[in-house]
Amino acid sequence: MRSQFDTATAVTREAPGRYVANVDAGWSIGGRPNGGYLMAMVARAACLEVSPPSDGGADRDASAPLDPLAVSASFPASPSPGEVRLDLEVVRRGRAVSTVHARMTQDGATQVDALVTCGRLPDASTTRYDGTTRPLLPPIGECFELPTEGPGFEVLLMKVVRQQLDPAVLGWTRGEPTGQPEVRGYVSLADGREPDPLSLVLVVDAAPPPPFALGIRGWIPTLQLSAWVRGRPAPGPLVVRSRPSLVVTADDGTGFTDETCEIWDSTGALVAHGTQLAGLRHA
C-alpha cells in the first residue's frame, strides 16, 4: 500500500514543466499546510522532471527519480487544501546534478517559490569530517509523544509525523518554559514508512518552534526554508535537533527568528541539515 506521505506529496505531470498536485489538510499546523510538506511536494516534481527516461524514450521512470540534494524555498502565501499547480523551469540539466526553478500556484497566486538541486546520493559513503554532535536522548519509550492539540491551535501534522521528544525540552507544554530554545527527539512517519531523501525535506520543518521555550506563544510562520540532504538514511527513527541562533522581538511581541535543524539516522550518521527564517506574529 502507498504510504500517507507518498499519497500526500503525489504529483501528476500534465506536460513538460507542468504538474498538478493536491494539498492535503492532514499535513497542516493551525489549518495551514506545513512548509516542509509543501517543499517535499515541490522537490518530488522537480526530481521527476529531470530524472532520466526509463528506456531512452519520452516517459520518465517514476520508480527511480533523482534525489533532492538541496531545496531552498520562500513562502509568500499559504495554499488552502486542494489543487495546486507546479510550474518548473530546468535551469541546468547536468550529467550528475541538475537545477530546477519551481513555482507552486493556486488560483493564479504564487504560494511557494523554490530552487531545487537534484542528483543521485550514493548508497554508501565515507565521512571525512563531521562537525556536529548528535544529542544524547532518553530511550525512545521515555520520550513524550506530541499530541494534535497545539498551543492554542490544532496540529494535524502530529497524526502523520510521529514526534517523541526529550521531556527536558518541553517545559513550555506545562507552562514552564526553560529559557533554553532547543527541541530534540525522535521523528518518524506514523504509518511506518521508512525515511528516504525526500521525507528528510519534510522533517527539517516538522519539529515545534524552539522559541516556545522562551515563553513565546502563537503563530510562527516559515518565511524562507532551506534543506540540504547529506545522505541516504538507514531504516528506523530519525534523531532531530532544532535551535535558533537569534530571536528578536519588537515591543508588540512580533519579530523574527531563525532556526537550524540537524537530522541523524538510526546509525548516528548526519543525513540532513536545514535552516529557516520565521516570523513571530502573536507572541
Image (cartoon, helix red, strand yellow):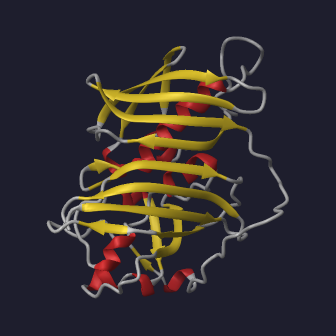
* Residue at 66%, 21% in the rendered image: 60
* Residue at 64%, 51% in the rendered image: 229
Q: Quadrant of residue 274?
A: bottom right
Q: Name the foreground residue: 55 vs 261.
A: 261
- The quadrant of the image that shows the N terminus is top right
Q: Is residue 71 left or right of residue 39?
A: right
The answer to whether residue 34 is seen in the rendering is no
* Residue at 16%, 69% in the rendered image: 251
Q: Is residue 198 left or right of residue 126?
A: left
Q: Where is residue 212 drawn, in percent x and y?
A: 32, 74
Q: Quadrant of residue 140?
A: bottom right
Q: Where is residue 278 drawn, in percent x and y?
A: 35, 56
The answer to whether residue 54 is seen in the rendering is yes
Q: Name the foreground residue: 88 vs 235.
A: 88
Q: Residue lying farthest left?
A: 252
Q: Where is residue 243 drawn, in percent x and y?
A: 47, 70
Total numbered circles:
0
Q: Is residue 158 left or right of residue 186?
A: left
* Rendered position, 6 above or below 51: below
Q: Name the foreground residue: 278 vs 23.
A: 278
Q: Where is residue 154 drawn, in percent x and y?
A: 24, 61
* Rendered position, 214 above or below 42: below
- The quadrant of the image that shows the C terminus is bottom left
* Rendered position, 4 above or below 77: below
* Residue at 40%, 55% in the rendered image: 277
